[in-house]
Image (tube, coloured by chain):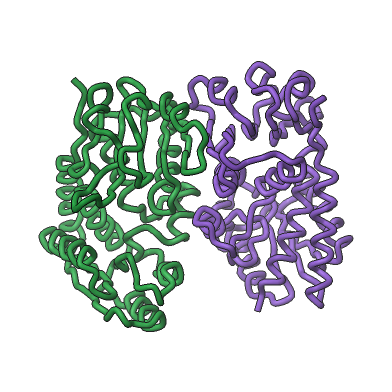
Chain colours: A green, B purple
Amino acid sequence: MYKTLTGREPAEAILSDAKRRAQALGRSAGLAIVLVGSDPASELYVKKKLEKAASAGVNARLEKLPETATESEVLRLVKSLNRDTSIDGFIVQAPLPKQIDPIRVLEAIEPGKDVDGWTSANLGKLAAGMADALLPATPLGVMKMLEFHGAELRGKHAVVIGRSNVVGKPLALLLLAKDATVTICHSKTQNLAQHTKSADILIAAAGVPNLVKADMVKSGAFVIDVGTTRVGGKTQGDVDFPAVIKKANCSPVPGGVGPLTVAILISNVIEAASRRP
Amino acid sequence: MYKTLTGREPAEAILSDAKRRAQALGRSAGLAIVLVGSDPASELYVKKKLEKAASAGVNARLEKLPETATESEVLRLVKSLNRDTSIDGFIVQAPLPKQIDPIRVLEAIEPGKDVDGWTSANLGKLAAGMADALLPATPLGVMKMLEFHGAELRGKHAVVIGRSNVVGKPLALLLLAKDATVTICHSKTQNLAQHTKSADILIAAAGVPNLVKADMVKSGAFVIDVGTTRVGGKTQGDVDFPAVIKKANCSPVPGGVGPLTVAILISNVIEAASRRP
């Protein structure tokens, strides 16, 4: 009766649109991914991103540094990628080894090449409503998901649980730009259920498995689960999906927002390429 | 029974703190105000800012351009102020004549000298929680007002009516950083009263006189009125003060947030000066 909000179809729509824009470029776009160390999960993500990018016609290359790399070595690489004319956009895969300040590395990325959209420069452009912002993948994925599945936003109450710089805050700003009334909840929120119960759109990005129960959800709402917590070898979302899907439209984990994020990374690379002079 | 939240005392506290920090600098801080044209209200504001700055020991100077100035003339002045080592911070007084794009001028200001805190760079730093953000005067004034009058924020529900880049959005981010649960309402919000009624902290920044009536306010809340609409030669806030003050703590207009903004501009100039190498 209610929709399972899967990510595969909107992801395919984004990818085919990106391929169309890539062809219009008249050249191949260039992506680099910086990987420091050899965290197995990171290696897997990076491999997936490189493969997807290549299959979309993007020149994608890996820039690998050892686990023992110093901050200045990473910064030197970032600066050389900023200058590298064959690279339209690049990302530094998180997490970084602990001897490296992730904010200092992030902020060193040229905003026009920041295809993760995580620099404060792009967050500020997003907040200010500037057209040249590069937008972060997960929040933009949620917006594409809502759009694809026909959720109305204008004047509606959207509640975001989570206030990270890469998900909660940019997502709140994107929902606001679409004329939703936006509430941002987090770990210090009193009476979480009181807020979520009035949400027409509910986004769970807290990283707390099973946080959102059916009795916290308004009937007929759109619930998007951004949680991805590893529990006993399995990825778990923030939403009690089997119960919530009986009264509201809900995205599953896995299979929900996940597939969208790589598609948006590729779309951002094409976007960055098409803006370069 | 409820407090009238006046701005004079917190403004004095900010100014005397700024003077103390100015002395620690060991030199005079330099402020420039760019005024394009001769709008009487703007001339009055600028005069007040220059006088207050001078009385706080800041070297304040006016940079005046004619109403007919071109955008490139204004941009040239901005760039020269960016380079001018005698200037620690500067602002371009709004509004600008219509032949000039205000965003292009604003974004040309060096973020470290942007003492209005209006550039997307500073908005992004604020959103990302970076310590080197220069914060906009009115939102920071509201925060100082709440702090001065003892409003608790952590875990409380704060509702902001208005989503401008210079008031509503930065204010929402500042409240969020103080652990409030934050709802942002605006002209497209359905059932405004439903949101405001549950607000422990209510900030009205819509620019709609008399928008907030007593029956929309929770008993005992802190209500800050940021509205300043000129109606028949008088400045009117967004809040029905005589009725609201009977059931909640409320700031008046005029005499509320207004006096804080100039104090914060001066404080920002000292802050910018103390950060310069």
Instruction: Locate residue B142: give its quadrant.
Output: top right
Q: Residue at x 81, y 35 (%)?
A: B254
Residue B171 horizontal side relative to residue A11, left or right: right
Residue sitting nearer the eye, A109 or A273: A109
Residue at the extreme right: B55
The vertical placement of B176 against A61, above or below, is above
Residue sitting nearer the eye, A11 or B52: A11
Residue sitting nearer the eye, A94 or B150: B150
Q: Can residue B104 be seen in this view?
A: no
**Which quarter of the image is occupied by the N terminus of chain A?**
top left
Q: Where is residue B212 in the image (x, y as percent from the top left)?
A: 66, 23
Instruction: Locate residue B114: give its quadrant.
Output: bottom right
The vertical placement of B141 against B213, above or below, is below
**Which quarter of the image is occupied by the C terminus of chain A?**
bottom left
Q: Which residue is drawn at 15% across and 54% down?
A: A19
Q: Which residue is drawn at 61% across and 69% down?
A: B79
The vertical placement of B170 against A276, above or below, is above
Instruction: Locate residue A179: give its quadrant.
Output: top left
Q: Can residue A87 be seen in this view?
A: yes
Q: Residue at x 70, y 54 (%)?
A: B36
Q: Position of residue A275 (x, y in %)?
A: 32, 60
Residue A111 horizontal side relative to residue A147, left or right: right
Residue B28 horizontal side relative to residue A47, left or right: right
Residue at the extreme left: A55
Count the marks.
0
Residue A64 horizontal side relative to residue A181, left or right: left
Residue at the extreme top: B215
Q: Position of residue A269 (x, y in %)?
A: 26, 60
Q: Position of residue A201 (x, y in %)?
A: 36, 30
